[in-house]
Every structure is written in C-alpha cells, then in structure tokens.
Amino acid sequence: MSPAAFFEKWVARVAWALVVVSGIVAALLSMRALAFRKASLLPDPSRLLPAVDAATPPALRPLDWSIFRGRVGSGAPADSALSQRFRLAGTFFELAAGGEDDRVAILDDLAQDRQLLVREKDDVDGVLVVQIQRDRVILRDGDGKEAELTLTFTGGSGAAGGAGGKGAADGAPPAGRFGGNRVGEGRWTFNRAALLRYYQDLRDQPERLVQLFDSLKPVYTADNRISGYRLGVEGEREFFDAVGLSEGDVVRRVNNVEMTNRRRAEFFVSQFVRNDANAFVLDVERGGTTNRLVYEVR
C-alpha cells in the first residue's frame, strides 16, 4: 500500500471514530439537559406568587384566602349538629381507572375521633355526602337537614380541631421557610404562598429540583414493578424534615394513588401549583408499619 493510500485510510478511520465519540457525548449531554428541564415540564407558578420581601418570613394574610372561591369560613349555622361533628380538612382529585377524575374530601369525624376519605353519594353512619367542591362539602342527615362545611384554619363552622390532633394553628403565622405547622400526629398545615415560593426557587435552580426527585428512589417488586419510592436524601433535607419524612421511609400511595412512576409525582406537583388540590394524603411505610400523613394547604 502506498504511503498516500495508507494516510487516506488512517484519516478516514479517525474521522469515523470522532463521529461516534461525538454522538455519544451529545447523547449524554442531551440526557443531562433533559433532567435539568424537569422544571420546564412542570407548571410555572410565577404568576401565582404574591410580591414578598425575601427577608420577611411568609405569613398568612387576607390576600392568601383569595385563592378560594366563595365565602371561606361561612356555611351552616354554628348550632348545626353536622357542622359540629364534621370538619372539612381538604379536597383533591383521585385518578380513576376509567379516565374520570373524582373529587375526594377529607373529613374529620370529631365525634368518633377518626378521619374519613369520602366521595359524593357516600354514606357515613346515615349522613349522605351530597356534593364536594374544591373548598366546600355539603352533607345531609337522615332528617333531610343539610350543612355546608368550608375550608378554614380558625373560626366559623367546621373549624374544629382535626381528629387526633389539636386543630390548626390558632391564627398564628406558619413557622419556617415552607410555611408549615405540625398540628397533630401525622398532620400538618402549610401556607400555599410559602410553598409556591419554594417551588419557584427549585425551578430557578433546576439542579436542586433534580436532587429532590432523585432523593426518592424506586422500590421494585420481584417482577420488576415499582411499588413505591424510598427516601434517600440527596438534597433538600430541610424540606423532607419539614414534611415529617425520614431516611428510609417508603411512600406507597399519594391521595389513594399507588406511586408506580415519577409521572404521578409530577402530576401531584401540577395539581398543587394549579390549585386543583388543597390536601395531600401520603401512605408511608416506616419500620414495617404503614402510616398516613396528611397535609392541608391554605
């Protein structure tokens, strides 16, 4: 082979190798870029955020209540037996197998110290759930008397403390950067505006959002299906502490939906940002026991 032919063949091989290496590098960079674009795949809350001084801790203000339709804290007369027995903790959409979304309400049954997840037309000891809206529930007793329970932290009908807890904070501003207060065993209330500000911070620093998602690692069954997500903190530990999650906890269900993929987690984030849900119920396995954690967002 002549020197010119050898040189030409060598150059062709090197060029082909460079093409392959460049393709691999480009693919890796694209995968990383896709991970960092998680923030852009989720709704942008910036237009929902009220102006706030970053040096001032978020507090409940009258403006925060404007996210609810109608008259928050109003409803049935205070002497209504139903409004004295039940308290509305929150509502959320439950994904149904047929593609229809059903709104579910979280009711505290103060008389029996229990918490109920109810749907329209459910019967609770002779009490009919007539209607569930985003911020209110209508109940009807056996005599045909109706009561309207509305969302509120303090005052008005249906504002009594939650089952097994001391009730929502007595009008005090929420503590901490996430606007959260623990109000009972396995129960928290959070300020929506504070959580939106935190979420916006994550979107502005997408590597933190990636760390947040990567802290929840899939748990696989014997047939290689995801049955939940185990917490192994890689970032945002302060947030996980604020919501009562510990290293090794396994989140099995959120709002009655089995956590079988991350798209479902992103769906619940979207529900929160769009204000389609004001309560979240997590079934969390810890030490072989499943506990229910409830978060009310106002």
Image: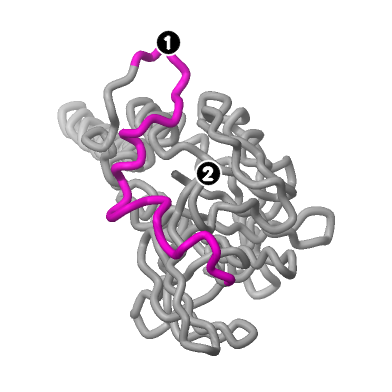
Q: In the rendered view, would you say 193 is above or below 144?
A: above
Residue 149 percent coordinates (x, y): 46, 63
Q: Main secondary structure of the magenta part?
A: loop
Q: Is residue 30 visible?
A: yes
Amino acid found under the numbered disc labelled 2: Thr
Residue 264 left/right relative to 49: right
**The N terminus: image quadrant:** top left
Instruction: Determine the image quadrant of residue 151.
Output: bottom left
Q: 221 and 135: which one is in front? A: 135
Residue 181 left/right relative to 190: right
Residue 77 covered by magenta stretch: yes
Residue 58 covered by magenta stretch: yes
Q: Which mark is residue 3?
A: none
Residue, x 43% and y 58% (percent of image)? 150
Residue 182 percent coordinates (x, y): 66, 39
Q: Which mark is residue 154?
A: 2
Q: Which mark is residue 55?
A: 1
Residue span colored magenta: 53-81
Residue 73 percent coordinates (x, y): 42, 51
